[in-house]
Every structure is written in structure tokens, then in C-alpha cells.
Amino acid sequence: MNVFIYTFENLKNNPIKAIIMFLSVGLGVAILIFALSISQLFNQLLDEKVNGQGIVLTVSNTQLQADGSYDRVRPLDITLDAADILKNSVEGAKHATVIVRNPFTELTVNSKKYNIRKMVGSTKVYFDVFWLSVIDGVLMSDADVTNSAKKMWISESTASILFGSTANAIGQKIEPPTFNFARRNQNSRVAPTIYTVAGVFKDPDELKRKVYSIADVVIPYTASLPSGDIATRILARIASTFVVSIENNPNADAQIRSAMALEYGDDIQLNVWEGDRSGPSVILQDIRDSVAVFTFVINLLGFILLISGTIGILSIMMVEILNKKREIAIERALGAAFSQIVSKFLMQSVILSGLSAVVGVVLVFVIATPLAATVLSVFDGLDSSDISGNIVQPMAILIGFLSALLFGGVLGVLPLFGFAKQSISEALRDV
């Protein structure tokens, strides 16, 4: 109790120095707590936004090339039945469907051309795989695929750009460009086909859209094929890629390969990845690498700022120890162990560190929200609106508080070890 009273008396006698110390150490504690909290939230947000509802794996009948690209196997080793095999044979598989990359890169509406990011051919299961909900119109049906229906399902943002609103888009006509199908030594030109907008789906989360390259326009995968037996032959050549959504299965890759090998043979050429149709997601890996580097740097900065702040405690305790140098020497002469002397000053520096840490905990709740908005804006696809609940994490508070006690306590008694090298007579003579 005497140590507490004495410490507060010293603070009362030096209010300006005490305020500066509390603010410097408190700011260091606050920054450290914020750094640890935002690091944890970054990783949580990344997992929730990309994998919160499971992961989507692309299963492709391809060969990996030396340049890192994937070349489709010809003839294909797999069939359209692969979607059912994936869904029924892989643990945690919820939905699976074929995807056919469509060559269209622009659409014509009322004689005006619009560029699009991505258009795919698939089935109604595509919407389930990528968690897309139809907000206007109707969902694609099996009959649309069977009958090669010339229908389109477009994203909410695409509908707004093309037609002003989602409601206005339903029933509108869209013309994709003409596409040539090679047939022997001739080109079989398909006359321009008019598609009707049958539905509008809600925009996916932007980060998910980029990671998985989710399409803005979806059509039945049979819709762009020419009529007749050529359609079957073309489909047999291009239906090489499937997507499957999986929940809670870290061994999904191995199970997919095993199931496909069991069905199509051990020599099947197969690649499995998380990303878009062309290959593993570079964006996802870049974001993960950036978050890892950022969290390391910001946490390191937090500890550096805390250590810099606790130098204020070192300064105060150094003055205190210098003023008590004679008393320390007398106590040693009377038989007091050096550890007893250290423990007394350690308690004093720990009290100062603890009070400063309390200031830091209060301060972090003030600065956390504006700082989080600034930091999150650096990462495309993440923003402060994604954070639900408190930014400040309990574990970060505990680590920040204990770190302040540790660094403050150690620096507070550091000057004592210089006196330990002196003999008692030298210490008394220097006073």
C-alpha cells in the first residue's frame, strides 16, 4: 500500500511529466491494441467474405503448361455427368455444374453497344454455386437448357446500366455479337440471335466476384450453340470445366480427384483450384499475401510505439532512482538483498505502466473506428461497413495491457542495474 501512496504522491508533485508519460505510453498501448485487433479482423473478414458460405472449387479436364496456363485436354476425358459425380461423391459438396466460357465481350441494346466483364453458359445450379439470388423475373429452368432457350440472366448492376433498373430489364431484348463456329474447312456463320432478359440476380459481394470471376451475364450453356448435330460435337469439346461449392471439407481436392479417377480412370488429366475458370485466383493470393505483410508490419509498429512510449517511464524511474541513490546504498549496507530493492521499484514502475495502459484502453475505443475506416480503404473489397460489433478485440486488450506492464516494468528498473555494479561505499561517496 505504501508503494501505491508514494507513487501517487510523486505523480501529484509532477503533474505535467505524469500527463506526458500517461499520454505517450497510453498512445503506444492504444496503437498496439488497434494493430492486433485490426489484424485479427482482417483475417476474419477475408475468410467470411470469400469462404464464409464455403468455397468454390473449379474442376477442369486440363493439363498444366510450363507457363502456368491450363490447356484443355482433347478429346475430353470427362462428360457432363461429372457434375452429379462431384455433388454425390465429395463430402460437403452442395452444388456442382458445368460452366462454358462464352466468347461474347459486348452486348447491343437498342443499337448501342456495351462492354461486359464476363458472360458464361451454365445451368440454374450456377446461381446456387455462387450464392446468387434472383431479385426480378424468374430463375433459369432445366427446360431452358434442354430447349436451348435464348434467355439471359443479368446482374443487378448490369440491369441498372443497360435499362435503368432491375424491373425495367425484364423482357428486354439483348443482341450479342455474331460468332463463327469452325466446321471442317468452312466457317458456319450463325445469324445474330436476340436474347430476352428473363431474370436479374443480386450483385455478388465484390471481393467474391473478383476472386471467382462471377459472371455479369448468365445464359443456358446450350443457348449459343448452333442447331443440329454439330451442337453435340461442340459441347463434347468445350464442356471440360465444372464448379462445385463445398462446405467444411479440407480434403475436398483429394476427394474430387479420387471420385473422378474412379469414374473416368486413373490416367485422367485433372486440375482443381480455387479461383475462376482460367486458373487459381491471383487476386485471392495477392490479398492474402498483402494482409499477412500488413498485419506483420502494423503489429511490429504497434510494439515499437509501445516500447518508445514506455521510455517515459524509464525517464521518471531514472530520476526517482537517482534521488533515492543514498537510500538504496543504506538499505544495501543494512543487508537488504538487491532483489528486494528491485521488487520495490518494479512495483512502482508496474503501477505507472498499469495506469498508462488504462489510458490506452480508453483511448483505443476513441480512435478505433476512424482508423479502421482509413486502413480498410487500402484493401479493395473491404470496408468498415463489413465490420459488425466492436473493432477492439478482448484478446488484443489483454495483450496490450500485459505488454505495457512488461515493457514498463523492465525499463523502470533498468537503471538499478547500473548501481548494482558499484560497491556500497562508492554509491554513498557519489551521493
Image (cartoon, helix red, strand yellow):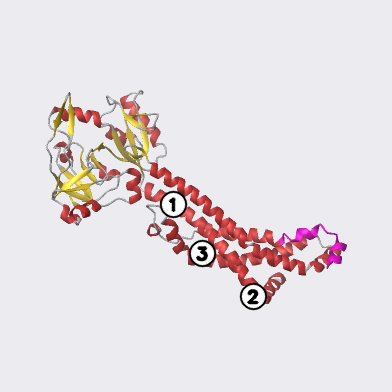
Q: Over which residues does the magenta segment extend?
A: 413-431
- Report whether 227 appears left or right of 404: left
Q: Tell me the element at label 2.
A: helix
- Disc 2 or disc 1, which is closer to the eye? 2
SS for dot 3? helix
> Crowding at label 3, few (<14), some or many (≥20) Cα neighbours within 10 Å?
many
Q: Main secondary structure of the magenta part?
A: helix
Labels 1, 3: front one: 3
Dots 1, 3 in contact, CB < 8 A: no
Q: From mark 1 to mark 3, how far is it between C-alphas?
A: 20 Å
Secondary structure under the numbered disc 1 in the rendered image: helix
Tell which of 152 and 17 is nearer to you: 17
Q: In the image, what residue type sits under mark 3?
A: Val
- According to the picture, the residue beneath numbered tag 3 turns out to be 364
Q: State yes or no: residue 59 in magenta.
A: no
Q: Going by the image, does 221 lie left or right of 10?
A: left
- Of the image marks 2 and 1, the number of the one nearer the N terminus: 2
In the picture shown, does residue 114 fall above or below 21? above
Which residue is rendered at x = 42% and y = 56% of the image? 376
Res. 241 image quadrant: top left
Residue position for label 1: 44
- Numbered badge on residue 321: none
Mark 3 or 2: the one toward you: 2
Question: Which residue is disc 2 drawn over?
Answer: 15
Left or right of 167, for residue 30: right
Callout 1 environment at 10 Å: few (<14), some (14 to 19), or many (20+)? few
Of label 3 and label 2, which has the lower sequence position?
2
- The residue that appears at 25% across and 50% down in the rendered structure is 133
Name the amino acid, label 1. Answer: Gln
Q: CA distance from mark 2 to mark 1?
A: 42 Å
